[in-house]
Image: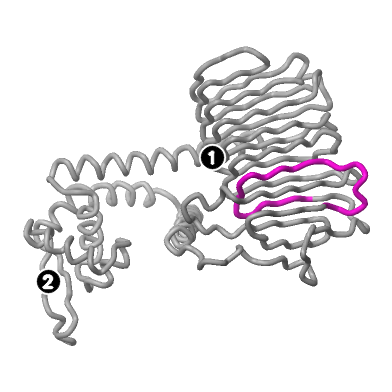
Amino acid sequence: MAEDKDRLIDEVGIELGELRRTADRLDEAVATQFGLNRTDLRCIGILYRRGRVTAGELAEESGLTPGAITTVLDRMERSGYANRVSDPTDRRRVLVTSTAATRELGARVYGEVELAGRAQLEGLDADRVRVIRDYVRGIRELYEEQVGAVATPAADGDTGGGAAQGDAQAGPFTAPLGGVTVGRLEFTRGAAKVNIRVDPELAELYRAEFEGGTPDIRVDGGTVAIGHKRRFRPFDWRGANSDIWLATAVPWEIALKGGMWKLSADLRGLELRSLEVGSGASDVEIWLPAPSGPVSVRVSGGASHVRVHRPAGAALRAVITGGASQLVFDGHELGAVGGRNYHESPGFAAAQDRYEVRFSGGASQLTIDAV
């Protein structure tokens, strides 16, 4: 049952990616057919849904500046897709209204899609529709957060937040081991140039040093949550560096979310309970320790340039959902594989201590070997 659920989650992620790509192709085809550029088409779509908006609202919803929206409206008006009229309640304000051409284009293209989607939902009970609504709403809110992060760069001198671990520290950052029985390391917003190592002589739970800005650090029991502020300025991450050392006195769960670039994780000597690398990971190299029991490793969301090394003799099964290109498994160059694939090391089924590594959403330049 757990494997079926994992497979379904992977397939939902794949279908969402395909939906975005198909919608993009539809927009491209419509823009070409009607002689529009993509910016004008986006504004026409907003006007089709809203019917009437102010020029400022159209600029905000489309992500354009006031100057750019004026140029777009000039083109839309000349092409018959918009009218600008004075607001009868405030003649200083300009309203943009749809036209027959806007409504016809919207109905012929997007209206049919909306009707077909509604027909599928009408066949479901209210509880299932509510689950779908909440999931789509959550995804949309995540996109809006990313838009805000990209569109609003931090002010100069913003180092990305300070530590929130009791009193301010100049670094390095540590936390007492105390009565912790299981450690958990989380990167909540992604990071660049992250080096994770094991220190058998470390008396604390962890130790961390950062260059290029101090992240927010939250320590709750055995959980160490590190959140780098995403500023999205050109080459912003190139000057960043995060060095993390983990104590071997406790087993660890590691969850690296939000996109990782240049991740090097040498976990040899650690008791690893689980490892998760979130979507958008690139230039990743992981050295796994000897497994203790069944250990889950998940890499999701279309990773690229990933190398996973396990100890010689350690049993491993790789499950690849969404295909992979330039796949090498234990020295065998398998090239490109599509769909869902399994690759197992000899003796995997009988092994008590073993790894199951799942790649979902596709992967490129993926190497799995024993060292």
Relative to 145, 53 lies left or right: left
Q: Which sits earlier in the primary sequence, circle 1 or circle 2?
A: 2
- Could you tell me which residue is drawn at 77 percent across and 65 percent down? 170
| Quadrant in the rendering for residue 173 | bottom right
Vertical arrangement, residue 235 with respect to residue 344, above or below: below
Vertical arrangement, residue 285 with respect to residue 56, above or below: above
Task: Inspect the magenta stretch and tell me whether residue 190 lies in it.
Answer: yes
* Cα gap from disc 1 to disc 2, whole angstroms: 43 Å
Q: Which mark is residue 84?
A: 2
Q: Where is residue 113 in the image (x, y as percent from the top left)?
A: 27, 47
Relative to 174, 79 lies left or right: left
**Mark 2 belongs to which amino acid?**
Arg
Name the residue tied to disc 1.
301
| Quadrant in the rendering for residue 58 | bottom left
Query: Is the stretch drawn in magenta largely helix, strand or loop?
Result: strand
**Element at badge 2?**
strand
Q: How crowded is mark 2: few (under 14 residues within 10 Å), some or many (20 or more)?
A: some
Q: Position of residue 258 (x, y in %)?
A: 58, 50
Vertical arrangement, residue 346 with respect to residue 76, above or below: above
**Does the image show residue 126?**
no
Task: Inspect the magenta stretch and tell me whether residue 143 lies in it.
Answer: no
> Could you tell me if the residues under marks 1 and 2 are in contact, i.e. CB atoms within 8 Å?
no
Question: Could you say which is closer to the camera, residue 23 or residue 129?
Answer: 23
- Could you tell me which residue is drawn at 89 percent across and 51 percent down? 181
Quadrant of the snapshot with the N terminus: top right
Q: What stretch is highlighted in magenta?
A: 184-206
Q: Where is residue 111 in the image (x, y as percent from the top left)?
A: 23, 52
Relative to 118, 207 lies left or right: right
Mark count? 2
